């Protein structure tokens, strides 16, 4: 009797595709302008950002435990669908209430993705003996993300000229809808030959039930010093990146025509793509080097914002190059530090910390918006960046135990046990 085809290697290409579709959003470059064109003030915009952040904050860790308890590819599909629904509301019913509801849905989708995608990727590679390739692959995912946002900024200009803000909205709805089948495809493996099997490590006991998974993840994040340190660093670096939400307003304040704003935003997003690639090569960087880079990046951010001219976006781009590099280093440290059975939950704890940092930034800037310009608001974000650089420079620089990168080569056979449970 013929044997059924054996599962092939983990589909990294679908991770790239899912990331690209959920970030290739022309609406991202202009949604702040869409909202202000319907009467939303800068202060109300900060409140909407806070609604977005609070939603993600509340859903972050519970959604991570869901991704440890249920198939991760389905969690990612639900995240894309939530994002798609939110953009539909913004485009079809542009009003303050619809904007708030859309941010709630987007926040839920962000929480469902946070921790889930990294854990699916790490476990998929580790099951094939390729954990050492995580830094390289995750840096490519980050580069795909940044390139997709840059491409969406480029596409936003002709879309706004041809069909106004609604055109950017409907295209974004379509792209996020296409991400749903891409996510579901991660639950299926292409048929492939089965080489000699790798030795199986002793499996980690999997907690039974949602509450047990949640407790296991929280215990590791809190009780393991190396994991706790990596969680805090990843949270701070991710949370400080939210200043990009103010960049369209900063560009308009600097005198950039509305149709050219997406083109100007290409600078920081291209820098983020380059920083993603650099992060993959510098996954073992120590705290001292990160401190120097963050100090320089924070100074460039403040100087670029305060110029009051479009040329200042060169300094902002330099900051985002540093920030994305540092985020890749921090995420790699975290994934290699986690050893328990609730990887997505632990990663979501870092996401929760990031949302706490982001919420603090949004609320602070929302209050400051009463008297400060967008340039001053963006420059203020450099202060916590510089403080983090000082903290890294002063603390002991421990060994991070990041495996050396492995060459890209045909993968060994997939070991289906742990991956099938989550993928």
Image (cartoon, rainbow, N blue to C red):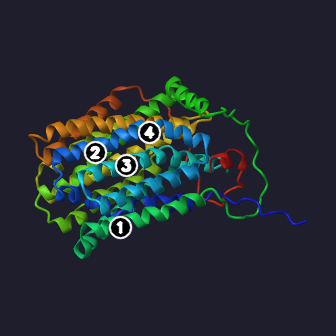
Tell me, yes or no, if residue 7 can be seen here: yes
| CB within 8 Å, label 4 to label 1 | no
The residue shown at (43%, 59%) is 22
Tell me, yes or no, if residue 137 can be seen here: no
Looking at the picture, does residue 417 appear above or below residue 57? Answer: below
Q: What residue does disc 3 label?
A: 324
Which of marks 3 and 1 precedes in the sequence? Answer: 1
Q: What residue does disc 2 label?
A: 49
Q: Disc number at residue 170? A: 1
Which of marks 2 and 1 precedes in the sequence? Answer: 2
How many tags in the picture? 4
Q: What residue does disc 4 label?
A: 59
Q: Nearer the viewer, residue 293 or 1?
A: 1
The residue shown at (72%, 50%) is 415
Q: Nearer the viewer, mark 4 or mark 3?
A: 4
Q: SS for tag 3?
A: helix
Looking at the picture, does residue 423 appear above or below residue 349? Answer: below
Label 4 and label 2: CA atoms lie apart by 16 Å
């Amino acid at each position: 009797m013929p044997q059924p085809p054996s599962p092939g290697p983990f589909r990294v290409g679908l991770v790239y595709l899912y990331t690209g579709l959920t970030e290739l959003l022309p609406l991202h470059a202009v949604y702040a302008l869409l909202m202000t064109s319907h009467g939303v003030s800068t202060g109300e915009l900060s409140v909407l950002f806070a609604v977005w952040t609070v939603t993600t904050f509340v859903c972050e860790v519970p959604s991570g435990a869901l991704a440890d308890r249920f198939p991760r590819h389905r969690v990612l599909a639900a995240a894309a669908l939530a994002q798609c629904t939110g953009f539909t509301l913004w485009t079809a019913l542009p009003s303050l209430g619809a904007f708030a509801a859309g941010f709630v849905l987007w926040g839920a989708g962000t929480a469902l993705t946070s921790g889930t995608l990294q854990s699916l990727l790490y476990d998929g590679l580790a099951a094939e003996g390729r954990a050492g390739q995580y830094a390289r692959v995750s840096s490519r995912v980050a580069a795909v993300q940044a390139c997709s946002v840059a491409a969406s900024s480029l596409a936003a200009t002709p879309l706004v000229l041809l069909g106004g803000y609604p055109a950017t909205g409907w295209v974004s709805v379509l792209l996020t809808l296409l991400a749903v089948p891409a996510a579901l495809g991660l639950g299926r493996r292409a048929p492939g030959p089965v080489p000699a099997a790798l030795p199986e490590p002793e499996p980690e006991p999997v907690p039974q039930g949602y509450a047990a998974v949640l407790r296991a993840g929280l215990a590791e994040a809190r009780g393991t010093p190396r994991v706790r340190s990596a969680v805090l660093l990843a949270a701070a670096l991710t949370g400080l990146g939210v200043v990009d939400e103010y960049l369209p307003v900063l560009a308009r304040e600097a005198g950039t025509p509305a149709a050219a704003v997406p083109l100007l935003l290409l600078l920081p997003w291209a820098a983020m793509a380059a920083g993603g690639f650099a992060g993959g090569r510098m996954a073992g960087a120590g705290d001292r080097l990160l401190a120097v880079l963050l100090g320089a990046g924070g100074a460039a951010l403040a100087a670029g914002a305060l110029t009051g001219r479009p040329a200042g976006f060169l300094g902002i781009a330099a900051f985002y190059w540093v920030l994305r590099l540092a985020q890749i280093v921090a995420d790699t440290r975290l994934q290699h530090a986690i050893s328990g059975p609730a990887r997505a939950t632990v990663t979501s704890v870092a996401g929760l910390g990031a949302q706490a940092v982001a919420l603090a930034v949004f609320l602070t800037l929302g209050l400051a918006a009463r008297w400060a310009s967008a340039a001053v608001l963006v420059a203020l974000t450099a202060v916590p960046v510089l403080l983090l650089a000082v903290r890294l420079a002063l603390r002991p620089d421990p060994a991070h135990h990041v495996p050396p990168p492995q060459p890209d080569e045909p993968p060994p056979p997939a070991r289906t046990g742990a991956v099938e449970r989550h993928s």
